[in-house]
Image: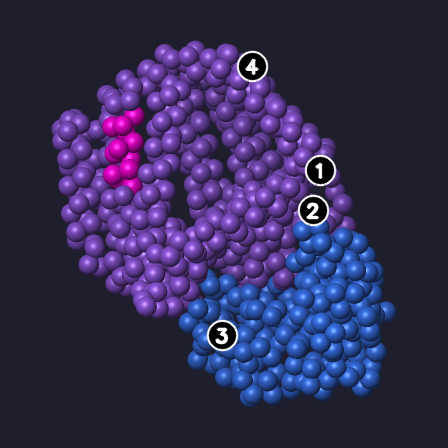
Chain colours: A blue, B purple
Amino acid sequence: MPTLLVDSVSTVLSKKRILEAITFELHKGEVLALVGHNGAGKSTLIKTIVGVLNKTSGNIVINGSDQDDDLLSYKQSFSYLPEEPLLLSELTVLQHFQLYGKSYQISETSLHERIDDYVTGFELTDKLNEYPESLSKGMRQKVQTICAFLPDTPLLIIDEPFMGLDVYAIAYFEQLLKDKIVKGTSILITSHQLDRVKNIADRYVLLQEGKLVQSGSIDDFDTITRRTE
Amino acid sequence: MKPSILWAYTFLGRQRFKKKMNIYQLTLRTVIDKTIAFYLAVFFGYLFMTMFVFGNVLSEYEEQFLWMQSQGERYFHLLIAVIPFRYIFLSFRHPGVMFSSSEYQLSLLPYSRQHIWFLSFFNKVIKRLFVMVLIGLCLFLLTPISGIFILKYFGMFFLIDFGMTIPQWFMFQRNILIKMLFWFVFVTINGIVFIVQSDPFSVVMLISVLLILNILLYPRLFVGVDWGKVITLCDYHLWNMAFVSRVSQVRIKPQRKYSLMRKLTYRKKPFHYTSQSIHHRLWQIVFIRNIEYIIQLIGILVLMLAVLNYIPKAGFMFIGIAVALYAYAAGTTSFFTNQFQADLVEVLPWDLMAYKQSFLKWYIMGSLPILVPLVPYFILHFTWWVPVQILLILLTGIYIYHVEINYSIAVLSKAKIAFVKERWISFIFLCLVVGSSPYPIVACLFPIIFPFLIEQRSFSILYDGS
């Protein structure tokens, strides 16, 4: 059973078809890179999988839970790191971690252990009681990254993870990602930094104008051509 | 050559207007094609001709208009004195002068931010003047209300709108204590106006106060301005087009509320690691973001029930209660759903039953003001049936709450449960409430609600979707 099954998924926004019959699978412990030009449909696909956008046809199944038939279990089966932090301006950094912990049913002891590790790694120990507005963009991205890494879900969905992170944070992020992979977490990742993605991913899926045009082993992936070519 | 700020500002305004018109046109085209547009034009043309040209409908309401005018003349001094409160309320969510991200971008070019602000201020004043003249003309031409009366009122509306713009801008930048200070000033003015009971005195006093406020606040106009907050809220007000959002089904995110609560230190403390503790904070966030709608919902229901107190026929009050029970449950349910359709919570897993449990406390708290107008009614119309009638009303209210929330939970979790039977039962219980007025013995049927209530209380959506 694949960790993620995307089967003939189409998405329409304002009567315009953004995604057309996308089909692919992602297996346990595997990293799949979603690549394509700006406007190819990567973020729309991610948002459709996450459930922020509604698909018009097809099926999405994570770890056996169907998005349409079993939404609550489906939502427990993945963790999402968005391109832009979705932090609430009314909650402090630590309160965000607690919200994630409770939502993913992490025990209090386990949550605090993980928070201690990640906060030290991302150098945020003195920011736990701050509101997001008082943090820099990079720090907010780090907070959102920690939130996404706290739960042990079968699938981790990551949209443009390197935006706003400094080199040390990127190195730590890659280390955490490797730890997750070793534990068997499957990862769906999208990024414009193709070199970095090539170091992490096992396979790739290339989107172009909302269609899946190519897929295969990341070793066979060369680069994306110019959009106008 | 020095660039013309007036040209740049009007260019910006023209482009913004064009863009908005384009969006409205595109939206209209998706809902109205040429055939429908033709029939609509014929329909409205017919309606206009029937009402105003042949039917002369407005002349039938001549007495009412004249009554309105006589009341308006009698209470002129009181009515104009309360208008400034509107601007105090508005200052919580609108700076009063449009300074969006486009104006901000313009200020990064070689144009002064202050000059742009003043252009925006005069733009607002001219628009308001135009709208008021238009409405005033329509009233003058279509109704029997006298021109002097219209001029007197609209003149004061305009003067107050003009005079309160700078105070509103100032209050928007400041905390609630400053707003309360303004509130106190205008409460005092209203008190004096009420005692003196003179139109000329009221006008002179109001204009003098507005003049003093503007003179005092003018030098502080650009001191301590939170431009980020101004821009965020102006962008929201500018582009949040309700019709477009509804048709395109693209949600405009509610503006971020910069509440005083964030400054309270205890709110920074970590949560007790329980769902209840975390959910209560999340509900507070939703309520603060939707405070205007909540006040509107509760306010309308309180007003309706308060007015019904003065209607001698008892049946109307019970119909009002039934309407209020349903409207309140349906309204609060939309806030419940709202929690899961925006921001961070949307992408998190949902323990919907825990959310429902934590929401009940807020549901009950919000219903308390609605119960207030019922107290004098039941005291004045007391019989030994009243306790049983109240029991029936409360149980019906709780039952409808469970049904509506459970229905929302089913929709959110995509569970295929229709809730047709439950909604019919809600309707029957509401009918019992209405029927308990002419036939109080009907209220004795309240125990039949219990088994249905227990069934709804124990409703649950499991993680396998069943």
Q: As displayed, is residue B355 above or below residue A219?
A: above
Q: Marks 3 and 4: which is nearer the front? A: 3
Sequence-first disc among 2 and 1: 2
Asked which secondary structure carries label 4, the reply is: loop
Q: Is residue B371 magenta?
A: no
Mark 3–mark 4 distance (CA, rounded to whole Å): 66 Å
Could you tell me which residue is drawn at 31 percent across and 49 percent down?
B122
For numbered disc 1, what is the local secondary structure?
Answer: loop
> Which residue bears the numbered disc 2?
B410
Q: Nearer the viewer, mark 4 or mark 1?
A: 1
Note whether residue B463 is visible: no
* Residue identified by numbered label 1: B419
Q: Foreground mark, 4 or 2?
A: 2
- Between marks 3 and 2 in the image, the one whose residue lies nearer the viewer: 3
User: How far is the residue under mark 3 from the one under mark 2?
Assistant: 37 Å
Of mark 4 and mark 2, the one earlier in the sequence is: 2
Query: Mark 4 or 1 closer to N-term?
Result: 1
Instruction: Tell me the subunit letter for badge 2.
Output: B
Q: Is residue A31 left or right of residue B351?
A: right
Inspect the image, locate mark 4, and give the three-letter code of the amino acid beneath it.
Answer: Tyr
Discs 4 and 1 carry the same chain letter: yes
* Mark sitting on residue B342: none
Q: Position of residue B407 (x, y in %)?
A: 66, 42
Label 4 and label 1: CA atoms lie apart by 29 Å
